[in-house]
Image (cartoon, rainbow, N blue to C red):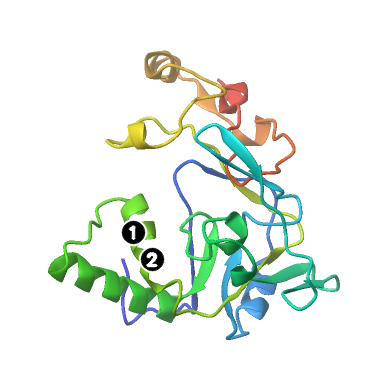
Amino acid sequence: MLSIENKNPLVCFFTDDGIMFKEQGVGIIEKVMQDINVVTYSMRMGLNVVRREHQGQSAPDQFCKNPQRSRVDLENGVLYWDKTAHFYGNYWSYSHSVDGHVFRYNDIFDWTDSICTLSVHNGLKCQTPNDYEAGLQTVWCSTTQWMSSSLESCYVNSPNNRVSDNFHDNSSGDTHYCSPDEMLRLYEQGKRIDFLKVPIPHIDCPHTEIDIMKGIQW
């Protein structure tokens, strides 16, 4: 719930199938976001991200090393890059994501207000997180061009969710399939997923399916 009375300067979005697999200090995010030229801090980006996968197709998607369009702050462990140095839709250009991205609260409040207005008057669909993220793309061109992240990502989206009404629109269980009936059976037996026991492979793409069933515990 967004409120004009909110006192927190920053807001971060996560999805229900995201996994934070490494600690991320809040202090460095607060420091980075004091730079008004930076539109977002992404926890899913880092130098380990080198490819994009979509609908079973994989393509290179790497950090721009042009010194005029990017900067590596080794002292603080932060990457900065110009989102316009990449083709729109690449991970490195996709600033307005609701998947592990930090924004200024005031920015999000204003953008959401615009999306609501478009939803009412122009019929812009805004019922799911995917709809909301799509709505955020309407402000991509009018926002600052610099993005930031840690040197290595600490968050990954694992497409395991199959319970929403529109899961057919998204990849789900393509690599590590488990039927909903089997998962329900295990749940009713009292078994739960301990995410500290889930093995995390090398992450080279922000959307990497993790075998979360390996974390099943009593």
Q: Residue 56, image x and y in percent?
A: 54, 31
Q: Is residue 202 left or right of residue 193?
A: right
Q: Give the quadrant of the N terminus.
A: bottom left
Q: Which disc number belongs to residue 217?
A: none
Gap between marks 1 and 2 measured at Cα: 6 Å
Count of marks placed on residues: 2
Q: Give the quadrant of the C terminus.
A: top right
* Quarter of the figure with residue 109: bottom left
Question: Helix, strand or loop at disc 1?
Answer: helix
Q: Amino acid at mark 1?
A: Tyr
Q: Please give the residue where the numbered disc 1 appears in the rendered image.
A: 132
Q: Which disc number belongs to residue 136?
A: 2
What residue sits 47% from the left and 65% below the top? Answer: 96
| Observer-nearest of 147 and 154 | 147
Q: Return the residue found at the far left.
A: 121
Q: Residue 91, image x and y in percent?
A: 59, 55
Circle 2: is it few (<14), some (14-19), or many (20+) Cα within 10 Å? Answer: some
Q: Residue 38, image x and y in percent?
A: 60, 78
What residue sits 40% from the left and 73% below the top? Answer: 139
Q: Amino acid at mark 2?
A: Leu
What residue sits 71% from the left and 57% below the top? Answer: 46
